[in-house]
C-alpha cells in the first residue's frame, strides 16, 4: 500500500494468505464456462489451449491428430503395396482359374482358399469347410470334392492331405496326437 508521502508498505505473503484476503472482500466473480480467448504473440500464431477450460480435451485432440496423420500416411503406402500385390495375384488367379472346370461346382459348404502351382508341377490346393460340426443341420455335413472333375485338364498322380499351413502331412499330425 502506498501512503500519501510516497512510502510503500510491503507485506510478505503466500498464495493462501492472498486467496483468503480476496475471499474476505466478498466480491462476486462471473462464472466462465466457455473457452478463454487464445493468446497470440504475433500474426496468425495463437497459443491455442493456453487459456482454456478443457485442457485435457485439447491435449487429446493435438495428440490424436498426429496419430491420424501417421495412419493416413501408412494407409496410403499400404494401398500402393496392395495394388502391386493385387496385380500379381490377379495374374496368379487368372492362370489358376484356367485349370478349373467351370461346369463343376463345389458343394455349398466348401470353398477354395488358395490354389497355387509350386515347383515341379506340384499344386497346392487349400479347401475349407465353411461350417462347424452341428452349426447347420444341412451344411455341417461331410463334403466331397471330386478333384478329377474339378481339374479335368490336369493329371493327378498323388494326393497328400496337409495341415492348413501346408507344412505337415495329416498322417504326421495324427501320430503326434
Image (tube, grey):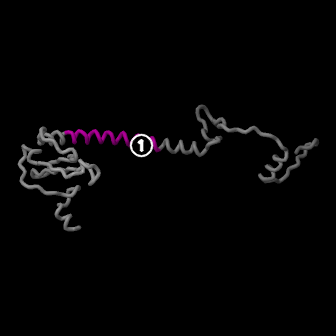
Q: Measured along the vertical axis of the image, is residue 32 above or below residue 117? A: above
Position of residue 109 measured from the top left corner of the image (x, y, whole percent): 22, 47
Q: Position of residue 45 (x, y in %)?
A: 59, 35
Q: Residue at x 20, y 65 (%)?
A: 174
Q: Residues within 10 Å of mark 1 (few under 14, many from 20)?
A: few
Judging from the image, what secondary structure is the residue with disc 1 in? helix
Q: Can you say whether 18 is above or below 32 in the image?
A: below
Q: Residue at x 85, y 44 (%)?
A: 25
Q: Position of residue 167 (x, y in %)?
A: 20, 59
Residue under the image location 53 percent in, 42 percent down: 62
Number of numbered discs visible in the structure rendering: 1
In the foreground, 149 or 75: 149
| Residue 92 percent location from the top left of the image | 18, 42
The answer to whether residue 122 is left or right of residue 17 is left
Q: Nearer the viewer, residue 26 or 148?
A: 148
Most frequent secondary structure within the magenta stretch = helix
Residue projecting furthest to the right: 5
Left/right placement of residue 12 relative to residue 33 reads: right
**Residue placed at 15% from the left, 50% from the top?**
144
State left or right for residue 77 relative to residue 28: left
Which quarter of the image is occupied by the N terminus?
top right
Along the line of sight, which residue is nearer the eye, 88 or 42? 88
Is the C terminus in the top left, top right, bottom left or bottom right quadrant?
bottom left
Q: Residue furthest top?
A: 43
The residue to which callout 1 is attached is: 71
The part of the chain drawn in magenta is 67-90
Name the residue at the bottom extreme: 176
Q: Is residue 80 magenta?
A: yes
Q: Quadrant of residue 95?
A: top left
Q: Is residue 92 magenta?
A: no
Amino acid at each position: 500500500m502506498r501512503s500519501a508521502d510516497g512510502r510503500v508498505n510491503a507485506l510478505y505473503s503466500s498464495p493462501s494468505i492472498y486467496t483468503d484476503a480476496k475471499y474476505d472482500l466478498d466480491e462476486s466473480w462471473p462464472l466462465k464456462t466457455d473457452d478463454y480467448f487464445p493468446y497470440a504473440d504475433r500474426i496468425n500464431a495463437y497459443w491455442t489451449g493456453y487459456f482454456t477450460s478443457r485442457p485435457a480435451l485439447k491435449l487429446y485432440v493435438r495428440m490424436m491428430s498426429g496419430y491420424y496423420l501417421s495412419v493416413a500416411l501408412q494407409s496410403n503406402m499400404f494401398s500402393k503395396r496392395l495394388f502391386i500385390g493385387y496385380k500379381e495375384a490377379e495374374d496368379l488367379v487368372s492362370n489358376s482359374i484356367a485349370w478349373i472346370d467351370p461346369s463343376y461346382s463345389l458343394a455349398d459348404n466348401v470353398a477354395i482358399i488358395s490354389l497355387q502351382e509350386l515347383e515341379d508341377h506340384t499344386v497346392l490346393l487349400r479347401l475349407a469347410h465353411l461350417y462347424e460340426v452341428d452349426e447347420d443341420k444341412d451344411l455341417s455335413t461331410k463334403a466331397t470334392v471330386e478333384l478329377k472333375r474339378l481339374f479335368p485338364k490336369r493329371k493327378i498322380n498323388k494326393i497328400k492331405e496337409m495341415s492348413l499351413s501346408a507344412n505337415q502331412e495329416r498322417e504326421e499330425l495324427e501320430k503326434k496326437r
